[in-house]
Image (spheres, rainbow, N blue to C red):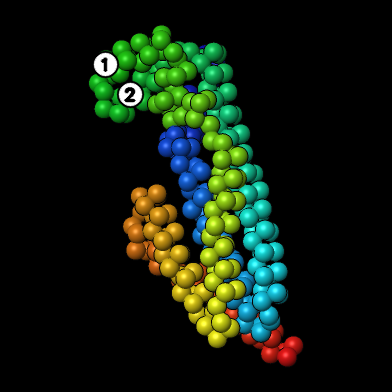
Amino acid sequence: MNGRDAGSHSEEAHVGGTGARLNWLRAGVLGANDGIVSTSSLVIGVAASGVGNDALLTAGLAGLTAGALSMGVGEYVSVSTQRDTERALVQKEKYELEHFPNEELDELTSLYEARGLSPDLARQVAVQLTERDAFAAHAEVELGFGEEDFTNPWHAAWASIASFVLGAFLPLITVLFLPADTRIIVTVVAAATALAITGTVSARLGGARVRPALVRNVLGGLTAMAITYGIGTLVGTRIG
């Protein structure tokens, strides 16, 4: 095959482009979920130590700021890496189309055969699409995305930051404006309800079953809150 290894395409990723379009929404749901869990756990742990509202507000705002920025930076770095991978796959495909056009035509034909077309029809379709726009044909069938579908790291970063802040405000407001004897339990209930919502949304976005995702989300959050509550109580007792 003109000097090229016939098995080289076995290592290429054939991925869909749907993830790029939902990237910012996924980041938003994850950001809200992390904002709820981390801030609820933080303020409950601090409240359990017996400190006043000023210390609670300081700890809550510090946790909110640090968490939002951490989520934003993490999403930007992660999605930037994904974007770099997509660009590399596109450049690789363009190189192969330029240097190995016959092999690429054979590959496109086989991809259409795999989709159910007869060998003759698959060949005709591959030839016509290649004559029209070879890269577009391969991008659609082989890669699942084109250059216009690259994921955007800034979309993911800002969606993550904004949703983290929104998620964090719920437990922060709840724990600050309720009496000391009820604020912890009400914060737990409010956070668990919000986690049930984000768990449901994330499951529907991923096409997964709602109940297992919801249960995992709520139990994970409750576990984190219980642990930090225990630590806060222990620290408050030792200091007191």
Q: Is residue 103 visible?
A: no
Q: Earlier in the sequence, mark 2 or mark 1?
A: 2
Q: Which residue is mark 1?
A: 121
User: Residue 206, how many percent across, how many down?
Assistant: 40, 49
Number of residues whose C-alpha sits closer than 10 Å to that of mark 1, classed few (under 14), some (14–19) or many (20 or more): some
Judge by depth and name the residue closer to the eye, 125 or 7. 125
In the image, 54: left or right of 101? right
The kind of residue on which mark 2 rests is Tyr
Furthest residue in direction top, as rendered: 131
Q: From this view, report whether residue 138 is shown above or below residue 163.
A: above
Tell me if label 2 and label 1 are in contact, CB under 8 Å: yes
Q: Which residue is mark 2?
A: 112
User: Residue 178, how many percent across, how many down?
Assistant: 55, 78
Rendered residue at 30%/28% (across/down): 115
Dot 1 lies on which element?
A: helix
Q: Quadrant of residue 233?
A: bottom right
Q: From this view, report whether residue 35 is shown above or below residue 75.
A: below
Number of residues whose C-alpha sits closer than 10 Å to that of mark 2, classed few (under 14), some (14–19) or many (20 or more): some
